[in-house]
Image (spheres, rainbow, N blue to C red):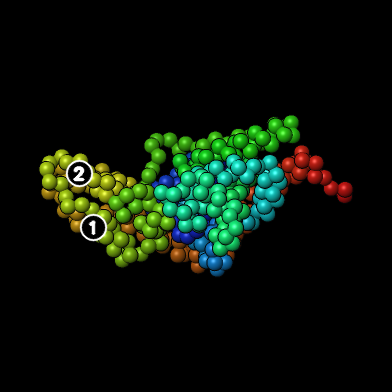
Amino acid sequence: MKEIVLSGIRATGQLHLGNYYGALSKFVRMQEEGIYDSNFFIADLHALTTHPDPKILHNNVKSILSEYLASGLDPEKSTIFVQSDVPEISELYLLLNMHVGIGELMRTASFKDKARKQLGIKTENDNDDNIEKEIIGTDSNKRVNAGLLTYPTLMAVDILIQHADHVPVGKDQEQHLELTRRFARRFNSVYGVEYFKEPANFNFGGAPVKVPGLDGSGKMGKSEGNCIYLLDDEKVLRKKVMRAVTDEGPKEPNSPMSEPIKNLFTLLELVSTPDKVKFFTDAYNDCSIRYGDLKKELAQDIINVTAPIRERIIDIQNNDEYLAKAVRMGAEKARARASKTLEEVRQIMGIKRFW
């Protein structure tokens, strides 16, 4: 029996180049190798923690589904589903929360970071006491919803209900994966069973890919506003790249690169040929580089990657029948495993029917 790999993306907007190189392209490679039972979902329930507009939420789900399929994920080879299409997840979420402590949830780094943003707590005054006082305070205009607090439980349920062996997560999600293992151990211990396995992080091999943004610092991300989206047309994409942050240029041969320039070269290494990378690296080292030429080449090479994907995304978005078929197939497969898990958990916990 193949080991199960599971991964999901929150339905918070279009996917970008970082999502593609950091995850999607690797998912497709894993799917084509056929070694694992591959499961990929769109986490629309997780997106509810930020109270998105209902129409926008549905459009985000449709967009990500189209981008999954356009990037090469195949519903005949992988299980592709929408989180809310598997109602068993919500019930197990309730049951597992009975064995999760408020304190351990409040101590998670992701909760504290998101609580800071929701409550408007400035980073210089953001010690744990301040956060907890704000959260449990009496100001009804400043609230952190319970869904945000129990986000790690829902993430754990996504994993445990499918009995996933491996979950590809980045550094910012490692704590959540460790919590999932802790919850699995706790459930097994409380009920004296060896039911839930402890999932491991999935290593694709090689160095992890960190796709930088265009603002000169940090990784590419929606909240940072420094993204190149898979759906960006040529005009928009070129404009973004040409506006990317640079410096004044090297003053001496073989000067170290500043962070913004390193970022541009990192992008170049992802989308361009080794010869082009060498050409611009040599030009930088001998101080003859023209950043305008570098950006023009970078923009064109990114377009060479994203343009075919963009065309497929648009075609798929307009094919409601194919989209419905893909997620229906995925939901049926995901629910088959999830419903069995939920029934077994109910039995273990003593929740039994009389008929």
Quarter of the image that includes the N terminus? top right
Instruction: Report x, y in % for residue 81.
Output: 59, 53
Q: Quadrant of residue 240?
A: bottom left
Q: Is residue 280 left or right of residue 43?
A: left
Q: Which residue position holds label 1?
A: 296
Viewer-nearest residue: 78 or 163: 163
Dot 2: element: helix
Do labels 2 and 1 touch, CB within 8 Å? no
Name the disc covering residue 281, or none.
2
Q: CA distance from mark 2 to mark 1?
A: 15 Å
Query: In the rendered structure, which amino acid carries the disc numbered 1?
Result: Lys
Q: Residues within 10 Å of mark 1 (few under 14, many from 20)?
A: some
Q: Is residue 159 left or right of residue 70?
A: right
The residue lying at 41 percent from left, 62 percent from top is 231
**Can residue 119 be seen in this snapshot?**
yes
The residue lying at 56 percent from left, 63 percent from top is 141
Instruction: Report x, y in % for residue 250.
Output: 15, 46
